[in-house]
Amino acid sequence: MCSATVSGRESGTLSLPKKTAADRAQGASAFDFMVFVGRFRPFHLGHLTVMRQALSLGRHLIVLVGSSRQARSHRNPFRFEEVRSCILGAFPPEECGRITVLPLIDRYNDLEWIRDVQAAVHGVVVQHHRPAAQGSADGSPPLVGLIGHSKDHSSYYLRMFPQWGAVECENCRGLSATPIRDAYFADAAAALETWKDALPANVAAFMAEFASTGEYRRLAEESAYIAKYRAGWADAPYPPTFLTADAVVVLSGHVLLVERRGLPGRGLLALPGGFVGQHERIKDAMIRELREETRLKVPAGFLEGGIRASQIFDHPYRSSRGRTVTQAFLIQLKATDEGFPKVRGGDDARSARWMPIAEIDPERMFEDHFHIIQTLIALSNS
């Protein structure tokens, strides 16, 4: 079992709720609820060890699966339901009753993400405990602890919840999902043999079955493409930063989308857009890419005049290809008696279509494009 350091968030010491003599005699838990956040793709024995540590410290474990409700990619190949099944399948039935596994979507905005985490935890607390506002039976509020390991850039969230206790775990056995995943998409059979001691048996069985699917073959092809793409820039004097432009064209409650023709994200829906040329302004690149990929026959002046909002999206890890900054523009077209302008796929787009905003499925959208649509529509209405 990994060792853990338990502390409070503000004072450096943890003030535990009062325990009765009966509680102490029964070995009462230090926390009422433990929270563990991760992507778990794949779920490995390092994760399992941390969860067992959490169950030894708390009465109930809340597992939040990040990067849920998005399209499969070589970085996030398994859907939330599959990850949840892998997690719960690694525990005996009697322990599963103490574990709640919930999806957590990528927000690319810390305040929104924190709100989602707080809401998810509060929902479980209300269900399994008296609401925090009312306190527990002895008058003290339920005690929540956040458990995790500060491994890299993705672990900064551990400092975002000062109201909860902190449980810092060691990196048990030095395991990381990334090399397992990379090896898996290079050669599934060889990877599962190499990493068999790092995966729960049920997870290894699931991954072996998934490797026989067309989805695996698509993701393996995408993984190889990304590796080659990144290798092409390996000799650059500085890590490259790419600049792109995207168009969110809306008309009568619909948004104009394209189906991607090439890798990465082949077959996924995306916003029309692409890389900014060396001698282009970003807005001009957006209009050019929009017209090339959708054959939208609306004069450039009308498109520019219809811009209602614009925002830069620069999360360092928003694109699997590397550091990619995009500026997206929301263009509001006016409805006419002629209906929707005709569109068809061109250039990098296999097809183009007008889609009702309410029917856009985030699990079919490329990278963070669903988030971009939501953000710009909200911005245009503010």
Image (tube, rainbow, N blue to C red):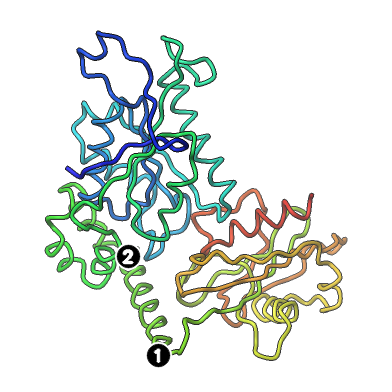
Please, what secondary structure does the residue beneath circle 2 have? helix
Q: Amino acid at mark 1?
A: Asp
Say what amino acid the circle numbered 2 marks: Gly
Residue 105 in the image: x percent, y percent? 49, 49
Q: Residues within 10 Å of mark 1 (few under 14, many from 20)?
A: few
Q: Residue drawn at (71%, 79%), measured in percent from left and top?
A: 282
Between 228 and 148, the one nearer to me in the picture = 148
**Disc 1 vs disc 2: Cβ atoms closer than 8 Å?**
no
Q: Which residue is mark 2?
A: 214
Q: How many marks?
A: 2
Which residue is drawn at the image coordinates 41% and 63% (left, top)?
A: 73
Closer to us: 312 or 292: 312
Q: Is residue 171 left or right of residue 159?
A: left
Query: Can you tell which of label 1 and label 2 is closer to the viewer?
Result: 1
- The disc placed on residue 377 is none
Can you identify the residue that label 1 sits on?
235
Depicted 311 relative to depicted 60: above or below:
below
User: In x, y percent, where is residue 218?
Assistant: 36, 69
Q: Secondary structure at mark 1?
A: loop
